[in-house]
Image (spheres, rainbow, N blue to C red):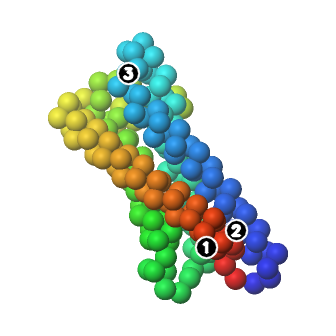
Amino acid sequence: MPQKKRKSYYTAAKALHWLVALIGILLLMSGWRAGDITPDNKPVFMMIHSGLGSLVFVLMLIRWWWRKKHKLYVRRQWYKKPSILIQLLFYPLLLLQPIIGVLQAAFTKYDVRAFDLINYSALAVENEQMFNIFHKLHGIIAIVLILLLCIHTIDRAKQFFVEDEVSIPK
């Protein structure tokens, strides 16, 4: 594959990466504040939060497809690279988190409509016990994502400042 074409594939992959990263960080930060939102503001907050979560799900599916289609980041001995191992954890968790969020929304007492278009709360009847299970799972995955984000940031900073290894694989 010509280097110019390969570089354009990496540019698109990086754009998707940073878009998901920015939205994901915003979701993690706002998720911690969700309990402090007043009941009057809860529907608007949940509309935006669930909409952005749905967007992350779609963007992650596109990222995964893009990587497979263009055979990006395929390295020998991938299991020896912490950044690749972290990616292998990030992808499924970033797909699972919105699914758990939808299941949580399905059992909540609040009306949850992603971007006021998709009514997730209409998927099931209100059930406090099921809501609590999915709420707890959503929180646990958020903590794992924050830890992975910290490890990923440290690993990339180490490669950039110490190893000088941040480049497009050939």
User: Where is mark 3, residue-wise?
Assistant: 36
Residue 138 lies, with reference to residue 78, above or below; the image says above
Q: CA distance from mark 2 to mark 3?
A: 40 Å
Q: Amino acid at mark 2?
A: Tyr
Residue 96 lies, with reference to residue 125, above or below; the image says below
User: Which residue does the image show at 45% across and 40% down from the upper left?
Assistant: 28
Residue 68 lies, with reference to residue 104, above or below; the image says below
Could you say which disc has been placed on residue 111 in the image? none
User: Which residue does the image show at 40% across and 53% down from the upper left?
Assistant: 147
Q: Quadrant of the C terminus?
A: bottom right
- Please, what secondary structure does the residue beneath circle 3 have? helix
Q: Amino acid at mark 3?
A: Asp
Q: Is residue 83 left or right of residue 98?
A: right
- Please, what secondary structure does the residue beneath circle 1 have? helix
Q: CA distance from mark 3 to mark 1?
A: 43 Å
Q: Quadrant of the N terminus?
A: bottom right
